[in-house]
Amino acid sequence: MKAVMVMYDSLRLQDLPCYGGKAIELPNFKRLAEHTVVFDNSYVCSMPCMPARRELHTGRANFLHRSWGPLEPFDDSMPELLKQNGIYSRIVTDHNHYVEDGGATYCTRYSTWECNRGQEGDPWQASAGPVPASTHSKPLAPGAPAPMVNLFNRMHGQDMINRASYQSVEDYPQARTFAQGIDFIEKNHQYDNWYIQIETFDPHEPFDTPDQYISRICDPDTLGELDWPPYAPVTETEEEIRSFRTHYLALLSFCDESLGRVLDQFDRYDLWKDTLLIVNTDHGYMLGEHGWWSKGSMPDYQEVMHTPFFIYDPRSRIKGERRQALVQTIDIAPTILDFFGIPVPKDMLGKPLKDTVANDASVREYALFGYHGGTLNVTDGRYKLMLAAKKDAPQGYDYTLMPCHMRARFSVQELQKAEWREPFDFTKGCNVIAVPTPNKYPAGDTLKPGGELLFDLQEDPGEMNPIENAEITRRLKDAILVLLKENDAPKELYDTYNF
């Protein structure tokens, strides 16, 4: 038995043909849907990048206890469990957050790993000269905090330096990553008992794309250079909006072509007979919907939280069908362990999807998802409830033994305020430190602190018209309370939202 995961970052469900996307031809995503089971109710659990990846390893929610950070010493790790049970595990990726402070301990759980540098202002190519000004993004609005301005200038300037090193399509991080994945399959397709994760940062911003993919949509000379949207409301001109969106679609075309290379390997070596294939993403992305760019700054709309998801399982060999069961990121690790016959640890709360692939068996009635300290969301597949933290909410905490942010260790000042806490039920008897962290509130007037939004996703899939229904709201709030208890959530969360 073998398994291949192809993972994208910020892959938007609504742009793929099997989910109704018509803006661009994506023949290999169409081909993928014909060879796999397509899930119509797949959701994130924890946002954003590294919290989602922790769940790929641990099969349980990250966001209730901690924000962005490394794998913890007490965490179960799916690829490490594979390795310990005689299954060779490998990751090839260009997701540069894996080699930052907050991504430590992930890649080393695999038997072997490779990380291709260069994405999103990665401090990779060296230049001691002046930081070049980016032509691919707009300056921050006046009044933005100075640290954000400094980070913005550094990342965007470094990105310009990195881009200058790409002389051909093959030089791009995504191309290098898929080349390494294809090479592994070429060299190992005749062997048994291996798992490879081919993971690209694309189509995450910046939407840096070779002109040949832009040419599939328009004349590159008629398109502006803006390809790095802000995490902010849409204030751009129509031409600037067109530039952002077109660059995203062009990068999506690049992703489609890379996917085709993997599908070709499945056909060439008939991997369909014994190889599990999972194609997934960590989350979606806002391209102007609800007047927003990117993610994290707005209420947790479907464009970010509702994700494309595909599985081919050689045990049932079902393809070209759709599934309505409610599934989440936390189900991936148990599914892979179950495929290789490895017992799923008790701390993994996700569910193996073998029977869901085979006959649409339900694995949960409700899905809980969100950001650490941010909006708490739940859906039953039809209705979705968003709850914003109260203004007078109790102090929130990061519970961890690996105190790192995205690109830095926790500061001495933060750690001076830390407290020692008793174990949670999944920390395997380990005490943890509790580091105070502020609650996060959605920007704008749509969801105010302490507020709530209820949507009927069947009647209003675009979430344009919130509804009021006390009975449904009460049922969804009760479901949240049950899920908080199942996850041994911190006690303060029960007083953070209006239940």
Image: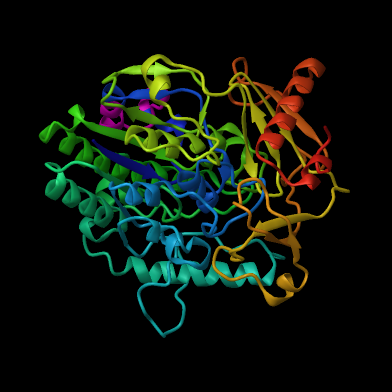
Q: Residue at x 45, y 64 (%)?
A: 135
The answer to whether residue 241 of the structure is visible from this angle is yes
Of 466 and 342, nearer the camera is 342
Of 84 and 42, nearer the camera is 84
Give the quarter of the figure containing the N terminus: top left
The answer to whether residue 218 of the structure is visible from this angle is no
Residue 499 position in % (x across, y down)? 82, 32
Of 491 and 446, nearer the camera is 491
How many marks overall? Answer: 0
Answer left or right for 282 relative to 390.
left
Residue 301 position in % (x across, y down)? 61, 35
**Residue lying farthest to the bottom in this orientation:** 128
Residue 28 inside the magenta-drawn segment = yes
Q: Quadrant of residue 323?
A: top left
Of 96 and 71, nearer the camera is 71
Residue 280 position in % (x across, y down)? 40, 37
Answer left or right for 439 relative to 32.
right
Residue 201 position in % (x across, y down)? 40, 52
**Residue lying farthest to the front in this orientation:** 429
Residue 57 inside the magenta-drawn segment = no
Q: Residue at x 82, y 18 (%)?
A: 470
Q: Which residues are magenta?
A: 17-32
Q: Quadrant of residue 38?
A: top left
